[in-house]
Structure formats: structure tokens, C-alpha cells
Amino acid sequence: MSHHVSPYIFMMCYCIQRSPLMQRGYLCVRRYDMESRSLRVMKVERESYLKSQQQFCNIFRQQGTMKQRLILGCAAVILALLILGASLGLNIQGTHAQASSASTAQSAHESQRNLFPWPQCTWWANQRYHQQHGIFVPWRTQSNAWQWKARAHDFHWRLSNTPAVGWIMVLQPWVQGAYGGGHVGVVEKVLGHGYFIASNLNWGAHPTVVTYVKFHAGAGVTFVHR
């Protein structure tokens, strides 16, 4: 049996292949194939993008959780420090209050005694003032006779240049017979024109005997009272 193909058949196949219809169909198939490939590529890229976005969100959430934990931890530490500081402050205040109370009690106890040495003029002035008014002077240090004016001012006692019965007389050094340490006494009687009688100890020829001496108001003479 002969397998010879007629030239007309070859010519017909060639014409069909080269016809515009066949070429348009080939182009459509090729375009479809390219679009399918593009869609597959776009799908893969989209899936990759979504995957990377999800990973980024997970990382951000983890970081947010860590930040929240860090903030909560710092807040807890600050709160603990505040509580500790308040506790220490209360303890310090309590200790200070106890020390202040003890100091006040000690001062009150000391104010019930005459701590100046006998027979100094300061002892008598303090003792006599207590006899007349029921209180001792509050100053204990820097309390030489000539310093009583400044100490009275420090303790908010009143100062005057005019004598009155029951007030303490303060003489500065070398004033009206006082020695270098000054002198204090208590006014017992006002005579007028600035003169007065004061009771004294450690004055004159008999230092251990209370004497009553006439003085007068003037320079270097101050009267203190509460």
C-alpha cells in the first residue's frame, strides 16, 4: 500500500497553518498561557507578602507584650519604692517625734530645777524669780550674768529699760559696781525717778548672803521678764 501524500494535502496544511485565523488562535493560546503564569506568580507573591505581613504582626505583638511587661515591672518597682519610702518617712517622723518628746520632757524636767550654781548671782535671780512667778528661766547655756539680756531675747522674753517689781535686773560688765561677768538680781521695790531696790547674791562683802541694794535705770541696765 502506498504511503505517498499528495502535494495538495501539504499545500492545504500549509495554508491552514499560515491563515490569520490559525495565527490568532495560536496567539490567544499563548496569551492565555502567559496570563496563567502571571496569575500564578502574582498568587505566590501575594501569599509570600501575606506571610511576611503576618510574621511582622506577630513580632510587633511580641514586642508590645514585652513592652507592657516592662512597663508593669517598672510600675511595680516604683510602687514598692514609694511604699518603702513612706514607711521609712513614718518611722523617721516617729523617731523624731519620740526624740522631740523626750527632749521636751527633759527640758520640762530641767525647767523645774534651778541649775545655776550657788552662790552665784544667777542662782539667786533664777530662784527668786521662781518664788515670785512659779517658773525658772529657760536658758541653760551661754548664761553668764551679762548674757541674760541676749538669752532672754532668744527665748522671746520681754526686755525693758524701766524697772518693775519682780523683774530681773541685768547689769553689763563694770556697770554700777558689777565685775567683768556682769550681775543679775531681782527688783524688789521701785523708788521712782529710775531708782529701785534689788535683791542680790554674791554682791559686796558677804557673797553668800542675800543683800538689798539700791540701783538706778540707765546705760547698761536692762530688765527682763516673761
Image (cartoon, helix red, strand yellow):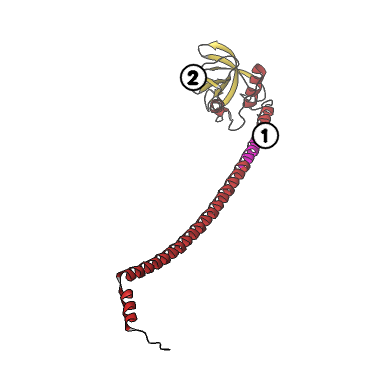
Q: Is the stretch drawn in magenta largely helix, strand or loop?
A: helix
Is residue 171 or residue 30 the one in the foreground? 30
Which residue does the numbered mark 2 point to in the structure image? Answer: 218
Which mark is nearer the camera, 1 or 2? 1
Is residue 20 or residue 32 the one in the foreground? 20
Above/below status of 90 relative to 32: above
Crowd class of label 1 (few under 14; some 14 to 19; many from 20; radius 10 Å): few
Amino acid type of the residue that numbered disc 1 sits on in the rendered structure: Gln
Q: Position of residue 86 (x, y in %)?
A: 61, 39
Image quadrant where residue 91 sits = top right
Dot 2 falls on a residue whose secondary structure is loop
In the shown orientation, is residue 10 left or right of residue 217? Answer: left
Who comes first in sequence, dot 1 or dot 2?
A: 1
Verify whether residue 199 appears in magenta: no
Q: Position of residue 64 (x, y in %)?
A: 53, 51
Crowd class of label 2 (few under 14; some 14 to 19; many from 20; radius 10 Å): some
Above/below status of 70 relative to 192: below
Return the mark for residue 13. Answer: none
Verify whether residue 87 appears in magenta: yes
Can the viewer see residue 35? yes
